[in-house]
Image (tube, rainbow, N blue to C red):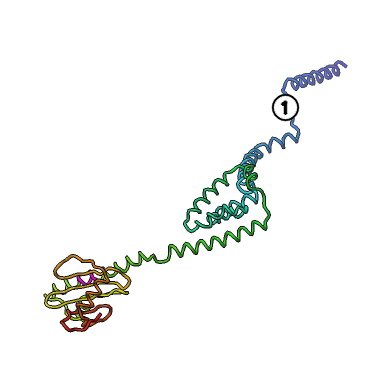
Amino acid sequence: EVAEVAEVAEVAEVAEVAEEAALSEPATPVKPESEKNTAESDWSAEAPVESDESEAITGKMFKKLTNGISSNRLQFLLVTLLLGAVGGHKIYYQKYKQAVPYLLFAWTGITAVVAFIEFIIYAAMDDQEFNRRFPQINQKTVNLSIVVSVVALLISLTLFSLIYCTDNPASSLETANSEASTAAVSCRTAFDGFYQKQSSYPESLDKISSAGCTVSGKSNLYILSQNMHFVIVGLHQEGDTAYLHSRQTSEIQEIDKAEAKIELRDAFTIVEQKNGIALITQKKSGDDDER
């Protein structure tokens, strides 16, 4: 019995020691499974949040630039930009009297500048102010205004081409005189070159041509070449000035073409003529007048 009691007491003591040791260690908390899953997904959830915010901001900006503009305003801005030069934006809202100056002066290009300035003003205008000044109109009126504006634009472009692309009479006259002067100067240079080589001046059309005297278009040269002397007269059929070169002077002389032709007719005779170059000689008394 004593042995049994001793054994029971020993077991009870060991159990008590073990219980005290267990109570002295801190308990490790056990997280529920839902909390574990939430903690593991925290890091992966942070990045998409920032991306979503960026996409939201970009979407708002794009919407403000595109979808934020009403179809009425967008159409009006396009008409102002593309057809404003001929008053298309005025025709769009049936303000025909205001469109008249645009139609009249579209060929000058000034109305295009004015319309572009108006486009900037309308684009920057507050929505409420724009809707107050430019209410919605029906699509049939929009289509009609666009057709009228396109026709007006085509007419303006036609007038512009007729005014600026057609040869200006003053410019044509200047060009003709310039061609005559160039031909005379070129022939004078050819004569000087021929003299340096031959110590004489060419006295036939073949020699004159081989020396380098040529004309183009409607220019003509009248050349007197004899006895170590020469006179070159250059003129153009559509010009009003004749250009005179001679051995006696190195400077070009400009004379009225009508007077030059009278002098050529009354005082000179055409000996030979070819390819716009006429070889002339002074008339003798009794000679018939020749052009």
Residue positioned most to the top? 2
Quadrant in the picture for residue 14: top right
Badge 1 is on which residue? 28
Quarter holding the C terminus? bottom left
Identify the main secondary structure in magenta.
helix
Left-right relation of 1 to 259: right
Q: Residue at x 53, y 63 (%)?
A: 155
Q: Secondary structure at mark 1?
A: loop
Residue 146 lies in magenta, yes or no?
Answer: no
Residue nearer the viewer, 172 or 21? 172
Q: Residue at x 23, y 78 (%)?
A: 265
Residue 89 appearing in the image = no
Q: Amino acid at mark 1?
A: Thr
What's drawn in magenta, residue-wise?
A: 184-189
Q: Residue at x 60, y 58 (%)?
A: 146
Residue 267 appearing in the image = yes
